[in-house]
Image (cartoon, rainbow, N blue to C red):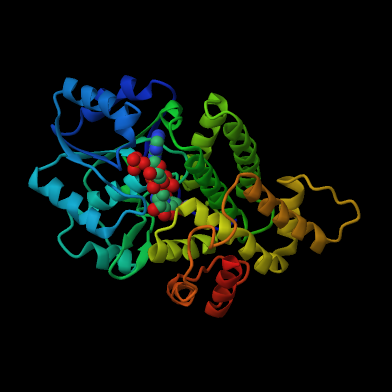
Amino acid sequence: MNNFIFENATKVYFGKGCVKEYLDCLLKPYGDTVLLAYGGGSIKKNGIYDTVTSLLRESGKTIVEFSGIMSNPTYTKVLEGAKLAREHHVDMILGIGGGSVMDCCKAVSMAAVYEGDIWEDFWARAGVIDFEPMPLGVIVTAAGTGSECNGGAVITNEEAKIKTGRDYPKCNPKFALMDPTYTYSLPTKQMISGGFDILSHIMETYFSEPNEDNLSDDLSEALMKSVIRNLRAAVRNPEDDTARSNLFWASTMAENRIIKLGKKCDFECHQIEHQLGAYTNCNHGFGLAVIHPVYYRHIYRYSLAKFVRFAEEVWKIPRAGRSDEEMAKAGVEALAGFIQEMGLPTTLRELGISDRAILKEIADSCNISQGSYKRMTREEILEMLQECFA
Ligand code: NZQ
Ligand code: ZN
């Protein structure tokens, strides 16, 4: 196991009714002016907006609204939020939404107080920053990114055509309120996209060194099986509370740093998907679904035993006389089968991408992971993207 330091500063309140029960008390340590941040309006349709604004008014808070945070939030939107926060002397940010809202809020929490050029000093290069962002609390409405329990803020700089993010622990929300019933109104396609994102985070951690006996891999297998089982159940019945609760907590568990402890972590599929997003604005989980099987077909030979273990433990594929190579391949194809079963896209064309010319730019601009079983070359990434196109 590799050395590690562990801390997670976010306090989680999980379960039905948690917003009404705890929000007032959680806001008390901060000042009176709250930047209420949300996305394109789903919270107005499902009633969450009314619930939260009533609670804020009852607590005597002044609300400054920051709305219209888009999926794959842009740096322009971050600067808009930061300006609003500064102009209204906001004391804290309350974000309500999925990964995009939470990430944008974290970025605003930094940009609103940082004196220099935060894009240059944080996102563009791994410079050393050390300052306390504006306090942030989140009410999570979608299972997927796990952004509620980490310091990652994935932001798209449209001008530079870069989508990127890093975990800055001081950006962890102070609190995360997670009521699984708040996720019920998520469109089924988005629920599946988020479900695949969870699976992706776990696989990106699992398929990396070290491979010898380690707790992370055991936890990851339990998590992957839980996500597969509960996503199937939630597709059958979107109001299956057990399934939605398990998916919700699995999304946090996959990205709250715990399973990453002692592991190198790969995240090459994420690196490619982020640049795919920068060029096409595609849905995060959908992009990952297209990339993962193609990537694993390229790398399984470099860690055959781990892919055999994946086939046996996660997909329960019997040996039945198969060689290691056949077992490993069968595991990857079981993953591809699950992607199809969930109705996720399997090609870039299905994602609505028709311009092959951008593939080289994506391959040339994405980060190359240090944690992969096989360090990819730009040529191989381009080859993979061509295969994804089919
Ligand atoms: O904007 P609104 O109207 O709220 O609608 C959203 C959006 O259209 C909707 N939605 C969310 N909760 C809902 C709901 N609709 C109805 N009922 C609800 N309860 O869902 C749509 C997608 O939301 P979004 O937040 O964009 O999706 P997701 O949670 O998948 O977040 C994706 C973003 O997170 C980044 C991705 O790259 C992408 O930019 N990631 C962040 C990570 C992190 N910070 O740790 C890690 C991830 O790997 C990922 O990169
Ligand atoms: Zn992700």
284 lies left or right of 309: left
Task: Kindly tell me whether residue 186 is visible in this rendering.
Answer: yes
12 and 97: which one is in front? Answer: 97
Instruction: Choose top left, top right, bottom left or bottom right for residue 221.
Output: top right
From this view, report whether residue 9 is shown above or below residue 124: above
Look at 53% across and 25% down and name the residue there.
241
Task: Kindly tell me whether residue 8 is visible in this rendering.
Answer: no
Residue 369: percent from left, percent from top: 51, 68
198 lies left or right of 294: left
2 and 192: which one is in front? Answer: 192
**In the rendered view of the protein, which quadrant contains the N terminus?**
bottom right
266 and 246: which one is in front? Answer: 246
Residue 110: percent from left, percent from top: 23, 53
Farthest bottom residue? 379
Instruction: Choose top left, top right, bottom left or bottom right for residue 30.
Output: top left
**In the rendered view of the protein, which quadrant contains the C terminus?**
bottom right
From this view, report whether residue 352 is shown above or below residue 144: below
Look at 33% across and 30% down and name the residue there.
45
Residue 145: percent from left, percent from top: 45, 46
Look at 18% across and 53% down and name the residue there.
80
164 lies left or right of 79: right
30 and 381: which one is in front? Answer: 381
Residue 184: percent from left, percent from top: 46, 30
Question: In the rendered picture of this protein, how many numbered marks are placed on residues?
Answer: 0
225 lies left or right of 91: right
Instruction: Choose top left, top right, bottom left or bottom right for residue 88.
Output: top left
Look at 62% across and 71% down and name the residue there.
374
